[in-house]
Image (tube, rainbow, N blue to C red):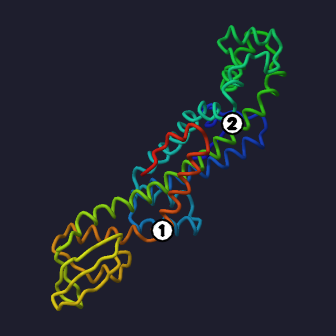
């Protein structure tokens, strides 16, 4: 699916200059393809993901790729459609909030005459329900064009005045969408890590039976932040890190649930410090990026 001018129009985004439109479409296309890829990865096995990536890298023809997707990801057309629609919906839902954040409320509430519009144009627009600068800046071009076809407003004056504000708003939307995508990725990684850690903390209580491939049976003495102490029947105590597969693979707990939880925690804790650092960094940036994002939760 190639995003185009009609797709932007459905989201209420318009450009006067083709170069600006193409630049924005390029950014949206990247976001769109990223979302399609993430959705498909949830449907495919790791082996299928590798096979699909090889097909893309080898520049297989579209017919072969479509046939492969039909066999391995029969819902791929729905995933493609949903990704495009969700991206459009974000553009629509954030537009007004972004507009409000770019200009002080006092400026948005100013009269159309203060924006520099001729009095006759301001009067007509007010009669059409567009009363303030803020309302004018979020009015779709299609609506303004419809008014111009029915009534004598000077579009040659109005559009050049609006254009710098509209372009800045669209660029802000683009930056925000990139931040939102990054925010959700980091939030998901960090939440996954915290959930796995919380489950391990609840299961590995003092006295939990465990068997080590080399040291034999023992019991958990303590566990904190993935650092596990086990006292074995021989009387020796050993320390193990649940962050390393080489340690986890040698441990066997009585409960299948505990074994699964420990291995899951080991898997998601790869790069745990980077995940935690990325989460706090992106959360701080999102909180200060635009005023309305301060309502974002403080923890995953």
Q: Position of residue 267 (x, y in %)?
A: 37, 70
Q: Position of residue 215 (x, y in %)?
A: 22, 90
Asked if marks 1 and 2 touch (Cβ < 8 Å), the reply is no
Query: Cα distance, mark 1 to mark 2?
Result: 35 Å
**Viewer-proximal residue, 85 or 256?**
256
Query: Regarding mark 2 in the picture, which secondary structure is present there?
Result: helix
Residue depicted at 75% across the width and 17% down the height: 112
- What residue would you read off at disc 1? 273
Does 124 sit left or right of 73 as displayed?
A: right
Residue depicted at 51% across the width and 60% down the height: 65
Q: Position of residue 258 (x, y in %)?
A: 22, 69
- What residue would you read off at disc 2? 169
Up the image or down, 130 lies above or below 108; here it is above
Camera sees residue 71: no
Q: Look at discs 1 and 2 and give the one toward the viewer.
A: 1
Query: Regarding mark 1 in the picture, which secondary structure is present there?
Result: helix
The residue carrying pointer 2 sits among few (fewer than 14), some (14 to 19) or many (20 or more) residues within 10 Å by Cα, namely: many
The residue carrying pointer 1 sits among few (fewer than 14), some (14 to 19) or many (20 or more) residues within 10 Å by Cα, namely: few
Residue depicted at 71% across the width and 21% down the height: 133
Residue depicted at 72% across the width and 47% down the height: 23
Q: Quadrant of residue 269?
A: bottom left
**Viewer-proximal residue, 283 or 69?**
283
Up the image or down, 87 lies above or below 193; here it is above
Q: Position of residue 35 (x, y in %)?
A: 51, 51
Does 261 sit left or right of 83 as displayed?
A: left
Camera sees residue 149: yes
**Viewer-proximal residue, 17 or 252?**
252
Name which of mark 1 and mark 2 comes first in the sequence.
2
């Amino acid at each position: 699916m190639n995003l185009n001018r009609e797709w932007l129009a459905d989201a209420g985004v318009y450009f006067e200059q083709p170069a600006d439109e193409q630049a924005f479409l390029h950014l949206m296309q990247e976001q769109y393809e990223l979302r399609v890829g993430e959705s498909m990865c949830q449907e495919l096995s790791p082996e299928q993901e590798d096979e699909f990536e090889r097909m893309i890298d080898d520049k297989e023809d579209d017919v072969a790729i479509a046939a492969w997707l039909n066999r391995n990801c029969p819902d791929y057309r729905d995933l493609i459609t949903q990704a495009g629609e969700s991206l459009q919906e974000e553009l629509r839902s954030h537009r007004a909030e972004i507009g409000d954040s770019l200009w002080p409320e006092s400026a948005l509430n100013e009269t159309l005459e203060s924006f520099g519009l001729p009095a006759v144009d301001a009067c007509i627009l007010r009669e059409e329900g567009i009363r303030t600068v803020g309302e004018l800046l979020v009015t779709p071009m299609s609506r303004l064009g419809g008014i111009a076809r029915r009534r004598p407003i000077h579009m040659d004056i109005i559009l050049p005045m609006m254009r710098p504000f509209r372009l800045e708003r669209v660029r802000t939307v683009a930056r925000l969408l990139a931040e939102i995508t990054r925010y959700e990725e980091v939030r998901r990684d960090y939440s996954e890590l915290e959930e796995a850690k919380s489950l391990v903390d609840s299961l590995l209580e003092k006295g939990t039976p465990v068997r080590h491939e080399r040291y034999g049976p023992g019991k958990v003495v303590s566990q904190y932040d993935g650092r596990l102490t086990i006292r074995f029947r021989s009387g020796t105590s050993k320390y193990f890190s649940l962050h390393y597969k080489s340690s986890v693979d040698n441990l066997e707990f009585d409960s299948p649930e505990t074994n699964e939880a420990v291995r899951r925690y080991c898997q998601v804790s790869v790069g745990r410090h980077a995940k935690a650092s990325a989460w706090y960094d992106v959360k701080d940036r999102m909180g200060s990026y635009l005023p309305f994002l301060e309502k974002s939760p403080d923890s995953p």
